[in-house]
Image (cartoon, coloured by chain):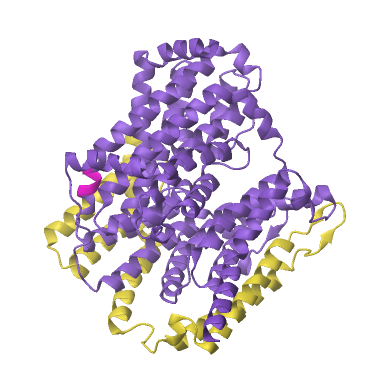
Amino acid sequence: MRRAELVTALIMAAFSVYLMVKSADLPIGWVPDEGPGGGAFPFWLSAGMLISCLWIMFNWYRRTTPPSQSDEPFMDSYALRSFALAGGGVTAMIALVHVVGIYGSVPLFLIYYIRFLGRHSWATALSIAVISTVVAFFFFDVALRIVLPKGYLEPLFIPLYSIFL
Amino acid sequence: MEILGLLGSGFLVAFEPLNLGLIILGVTVGLFIGAMPGLGSVNGVAILLPMTFLVPPASAMIFLAAIYYGAMYGGAISSIMLGIPGASTAVATTFDGRPLAMKGKADTALVVAASASFIGGTISILLFTGFAPALAHIALDFGDAEIFALMLLAFATFVGLSGDDIPKTIFSICIGLVFSSVGLDIMSGEPRLVFLDITGFMHGINFLVLAIGVYGIGEMLWTIEVTRGDTQMTKAVISFKGVIGNIGHMGRIWKSWTIGSFLGFFVGILPAAGATPGSLMAYGVAKMTASNPQDFGKGEPAGVSAPESANNAASTGSMLPMLTLGIPGSPTTAILLGGMVIWGLVPGPRLFIDETVFVWSLIASLYAANLFAFIINVAFVPLFLWMLKMPFTILAPTIFVLSLIGGYAPTEDMHDVWLMLIFGIGAYLLRKLDYPLAPAVLAIVLGPIAEPKLRQALLISGGDFSVFVTRPIAGPITIIAIILILLPVFQLIYRKMKGKKQAV
């Protein structure tokens, strides 16, 4: 945990410097007749971020905060495993939206999670997956007219569009 | 007394069968839309606006106002049940609402939220009835410096009281403010902070992307690790007696909803500010003036009633500049204003004189909408509680899916969904290191209001920062804000001095 605290502070400090540089694309001082330049607000705030990171690193050195005092691992094996399975699943679900659309990837994700990670029965997993997908379609696409991405499954929806939309 | 007569005739119109039906329908629709993370009153009002051409203008306004109200009630449901703020107006409700739900007291949170919303709505409608034209004048006195000072105060009520790791809190606020400035700069029109030249950043970082990432994905990842596979989430008890008992809480916490209602209404009147800063400030002030500030954030009902009464009071309040000055206070009221213009109603001081029937039936219908929203909300509480009893292994993927759709819905751009995932994973990792994330969410919400006001105020004063302390209204607000921000520093010095004295 101690090492993670320092590493994170260093990464955030580097990010702050990047933000400061990027903000400077626009004027950061006073522009005559226009007031503060566009870059001023983010620049000085990122400077504030940098100072906070330096302060965090100073606290790390003096061991005043709980994470800097603890020798526990940042993520133990259980945490790593659950992060990889759950987080990986969500990432895969989002990636699949580009291919098979929301109505393809959501049922797949639900089945993956409920059946394989949650160890519920196939009946539970399948019924939740199917019902959620159908409800989502009627709530978002039809009722609210927020057309969700369909990916390669678009042709299957054309008859549904002509009926409902 | 003439006002009461006008109000009475307004009620007669409001209780006509068509209007009453529209109120009940609007409130229910608003409730469900507000409860969905990613959707807010804007969605409901925008989409249902065309349907209102079928009915007379007064009825149409009543319907849309009912949706607006219902959504204010509904936002609390997602905050409490899922821990994801349903809309920016419900962010403060998560602070104590979610811990209450985790402790098995979701019914308390839900009923207190509904009751506080009802009280906030009622008080604000009463104030509106009595003082609408006069208050419009006060609102006009609030210029850019004043509104910026108010935003500063909203931040200050937060920082001064957090007690968390100070540099990490400052970091959180600053990064939230920086993210709020991504996109097109309002004043110069130039693109700002378009990371790696990805075009998706040109429309900025929507508050919901950060909020759903932090509170949806980040929270779930955190809970998955922390609960270590225990599937039972909350043990909520559903009973009719329980519901009534919870209403009794309201008596004890009267200070919080009084503060919330008045503060919320007043902040709502101001054109730039609305329910969001109002609810956040109400939370901060209620915590400051409470006898038990240390309980806030851990499941104190007053921490739910303050922001909830404030956001309902503010939604009534934000109708005031819309009707009296023609200035919409929020995107939703902007759409309401658009509707009014389409129907040939001209907002402004003349509205109260030329269209008395319309104005007073609208005000009367707000009372009715408030009442029905409360009844329907409380009636649905057992349903919401039943949903909470789902095993975690079903709740978690549901929330992930809701986050996905909720992240997509506001901008219909997959870029925002990926950004939300990155924020979620980042939030989870940072949370393990005790970085508070609520200030970042607060910052990204208030940033777009605070920054233009700051720049305009400086532009008018010619670069003179003293304008924030010398103007009669802005001055006291700014000074209070600065004191609150420096409070932790004073406390630190005070503690060190006491320690030294004892050592000697």
- Main SS of the magenta part reads helix
Point out the image quarter for the C terminus of chain B: bottom right
Using the rendered image of the protein, determine whether residue B501 is visible from the camera's viewpoint. Answer: yes
Using the rendered image of the protein, determine whether residue B413 is visible from the camera's viewpoint. Answer: no
Is B196 covered by the magenta stretch?
no
Q: Quadrant of residue A83?
A: bottom left
Picture coordinates of residue A82, whole percent (x, y)? 29, 75
Q: Nearer the viewer, residue B252 or B337?
A: B252
Is B385 covered by the magenta stretch?
yes
Query: Which residue is pictured at 19% across the width and 66% down the height?
Result: B231
Picture coordinates of residue A76, whole percent (x, y)? 32, 84
Query: Which residue is pictured at 31% across the width and 55% down the height?
Result: B100
Q: Which chain is purple?
A: B
Magenta part of the chain: B382-386
Q: Colour of chain A?
A: yellow
Picture mark count:
0
Horizontally, is A32 left or right of A58 in the view? right
**Can you say whether B17 is above or below B137 in the image?**
above
Q: Quadrant of residue B308?
A: top left
User: Outermost residue toward the right?
Assistant: A32
Picture coordinates of residue B397, whole percent (x, y)? 28, 61
**Can you say whether A12 is above or below B134 in the image?**
below
Q: Nearer the viewer, residue B324 or B187?
A: B324
Query: Which residue is pictured at 53% across the width and 86% down the height?
Result: B503
Horizontally, is B314 left or right of B346 in the view? left
Query: Which residue is pictured at 68% across the width and 54% down the height?
Result: B479
Horizontally, is B289 left or right of B182 in the view? left
**Can you say whether A28 is above or below B73 in the image?**
below
Q: Quadrant of residue A15?
A: bottom right
Picture coordinates of residue B296, whole percent (x, y)? 41, 57
Q: Nearer the viewer, residue B357 or B408?
A: B357
